[in-house]
Image (cartoon, rainbow, N blue to C red):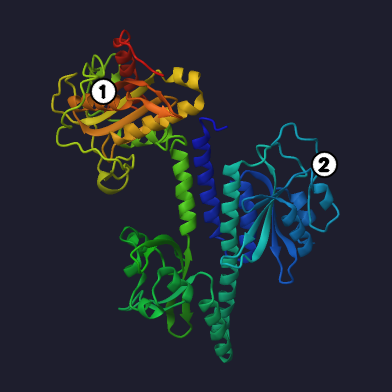
């Protein structure tokens, strides 16, 4: 069961995973890469022990790297397990996606095979998903391409929380194994290319053989490769590209020679490309395809030098990271959005509010009841609950059905908001004084608990989903609708006056109160709205508390009005 802290745990795990994946690209040799893979499992995925079993040329697997326990490392590093024994383990294991798990109840049949292991005895698990010392969890690593050639297997043990990994942990380990396979393949490729380049420099008489070796490594590399001019008027122009890069960008090699990377890069990433050094430079950016779309790639540069004339050309390795970027975006979305309604969650709401506030008040003065900010309205809105909504917000207010739940502005530190615009709030109470500000509408559903108690959580969840849809439909593109928790929602709408905000509250309440049909049954909920204002000098909690208090003032003012639900 997810807890309230789950989004924060997921965001922390995402950051750790991003860091250890980034570390994979810093290793200089295959041995360093293998050890970095093992260290990353312990440092970023919360396992106490990890081993990297690498496939040798003869097919058997050798323990090439270990992390977490020096004694165990000394015991099994360098030991070899036969390919038959490994295939038997992977075939009998339970599939967790691409992962393979052998519970301790089944592992006794493997005690006599030759796969190196460090397991110790332990008591029986006290609950279903408790980790046992004889549990075995493997993450196979496959080479990119359609053949799914096995490169090796990551073995993990002793989760720090003492439990089997859940779907989140399994996905993180699976994605890490995929990135590790790419790093190992790239390390092997770099090693081969370095040997070819050394031979070019050392032995003139072996030049033809070295050039052929380089050509094969270049042409048949699984990742994109390019050779470009270095220096002069044609600096950066592509001289040669391999088939993998041409396929990636959907352009033939003859066309690719007309471009430089600066011609192909996404306009927003040109600065990243220009900051990437020629010698050992790395960058993650987007390159344009022939069909007009863009693909995320990782560029790695190295200089191929001539002993007589100095640097001659630039060798660039282009790795397709579209899949990883999509996973990162998916993980980030899950961490910042409510799983039931798909709306921004409490953490994301607070982040968006915080981006609009600063510590310096826009004007002096505080209110004794609500702290920094405008004078509170007597109620959030008065009357007009059943009168419908005529017209729109001042300046034009358009309603649509597709929203991004965002403000539509650059976050602090980029774009037009490098220079902070102070948030101010209307000060005329219920009377519109012409001031436009960021309205914070706190919504609490009336009668929702009785629906939950009477018809069950399934019906309650369906009601929350429909309310979220109606709120989202009733606001503008660029406004934020967030679920604070339970049956509480918050709407952020910028550029409104006091009358605009009151009209919006009426409109949203009228959108909520029509019956909601769930499994053939019609149920109804009401809604109470409190209108607060985000103003510089206030904290996020002060803004939300102000709107929350106004909501309760409004709810009490209608205590004698019959509210039907169910």
Q: Residue furthest bottom?
A: 205
Quadrant where the C terminus sits is: top left
Of residues 160 and 344, the one nearer the viewer is: 344
Using the rendered image of the protein, determine whether residue 82 is visible from the camera's viewpoint.
no
Q: Position of residue 253 (x, y in %)?
A: 40, 79
**Whole-number angstrom distance, CA of label 2 to CA of label 1:** 63 Å
Q: Quadrant of residue 274?
A: bottom left
Q: Position of residue 450 (x, y in %)?
A: 45, 17
Which residue matches tag 1?
373
Q: Residue furthest right?
A: 112
Is residue 21 shown left or right of residue 234? right
Q: Position of residue 231 (x, y in %)?
A: 36, 76
Label annotation for residue 121: 2
Quadrant where the N terminus sits is: top right
Residue drawn at (59%, 43%) of the image: 167
- Whether pointer 2 and pointer 1 mark residues with C-beta atoms closer than 8 Å, the reply is no
Residue drawn at (77%, 58%) of the image: 88
Q: Position of residue 172 (x, y in %)?
A: 57, 48
Q: How many marks?
A: 2
Q: Residue furthest front?
A: 520
Residue drawn at (80%, 35%) of the image: 123
How many C-alpha atoms fall within 10 Å of the one at disc 2: few (<14), some, or many (≥20)? few
């Amino acid at each position: 069961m997810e807890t309230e802290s789950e989004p924060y745990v997921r965001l922390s795990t995402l950051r750790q995973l991003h860091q250890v994946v980034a570390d994979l690209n810093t290793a200089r040799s295959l041995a360093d890469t293998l050890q970095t893979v093992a260290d990353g499992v312990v440092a970023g995925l919360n396992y106490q022990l990890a081993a990297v079993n690498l496939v040798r040329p003869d097919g058997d697997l050798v323990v090439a790297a270990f992390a977490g326990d020096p004694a165990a490392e000394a015991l099994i590093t360098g030991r070899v397990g036969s390919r038959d024994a490994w295939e038997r383990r992977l075939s009998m294991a339970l599939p967790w996606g691409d992962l393979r798990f052998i519970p301790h109840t089944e592992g006794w049949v493997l005690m006599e095979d030759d796969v190196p292991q460090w397991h110790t005895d332990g008591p029986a698990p006290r609950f279903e998903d408790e980790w046992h010392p004889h549990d075995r969890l493997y993450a196979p690593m496959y080479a990119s391409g359609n053949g799914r050639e096995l490169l090796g297997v990551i073995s993990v043990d002793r989760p720090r929380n003492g439990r089997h990994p859940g779907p989140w942990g399994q996905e993180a380990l699976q994605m890490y194994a995929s990135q590790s396979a790419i790093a190992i393949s790239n390390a092997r490729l770099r090693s081969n290319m370095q040997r070819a380049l050394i031979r070019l420099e050392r032995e003139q008489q072996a030049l033809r053989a070295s050039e052929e070796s380089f050509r094969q490594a270049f042409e048949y590399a699984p990742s994109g490769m390019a050779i470009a001019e270095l220096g002069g008027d044609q600096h950066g122009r592509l001289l040669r590209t391999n088939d993998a890069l041409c396929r990636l960008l959907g352009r033939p090699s003859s066309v690719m020679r007309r471009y430089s990377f600066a011609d192909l890069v996404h306009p927003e990433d040109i600065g990243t490309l220009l900051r990437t050094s020629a010698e050992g430079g790395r960058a993650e950016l987007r390159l344009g395809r022939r069909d007009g779309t863009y693909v995320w790639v990782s560029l790695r540069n190295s200089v191929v030098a001539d002993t007589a004339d100095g640097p001659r050309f630039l060798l660039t390795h282009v790795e397709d990271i579209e899949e990883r970027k999509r996973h990162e975006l998916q993980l980030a979305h899950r961490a910042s959005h409510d799983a039931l309604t798909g709306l921004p969650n409490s953490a994301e709401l607070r982040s968006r509010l915080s981006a609009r506030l600063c510590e310096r008040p826009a004007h002096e003065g505080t209110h004794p009841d609500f702290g920094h900010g405008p004078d509170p309205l007597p109620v959030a809105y008065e009357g007009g609950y059943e009168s419908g909504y005529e017209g729109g917000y001042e300046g034009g207010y358009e309603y649509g059905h597709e929203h991004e739940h965002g403000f539509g502005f650059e976050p602090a530190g980029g774009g037009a908001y490098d220079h902070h615009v102070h948030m101010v709030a209307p000060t005329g109470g219920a009377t519109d004084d012409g001031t436009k500000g960021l309205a914070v509408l706190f919504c609490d559903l009336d009668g929702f608990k009785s629906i939950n108690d009477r018809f069950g959580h399934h019906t309650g969840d369906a009601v929350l989903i429909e309310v979220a849809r109606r709120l989202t439909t009733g606001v503008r593109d660029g406004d934020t609708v967030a679920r604070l928790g339970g049956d509480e929602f918050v709407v952020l709408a910028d550029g409104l006056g006091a009358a605009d905000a009151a009209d919006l509250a009426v409109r949203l309440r009228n959108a909520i109160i029509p019956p909601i049909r769930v499994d053939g049954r019609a149920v109804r909920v009401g809604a109470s709205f409190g209108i607060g204002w985000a103003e510089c000098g206030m904290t996020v909690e002060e803004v939300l508390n102000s709107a929350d208090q106004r909501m309760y003032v409004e709810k009490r003012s209608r205590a004698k009005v019959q509210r039907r639900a169910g």
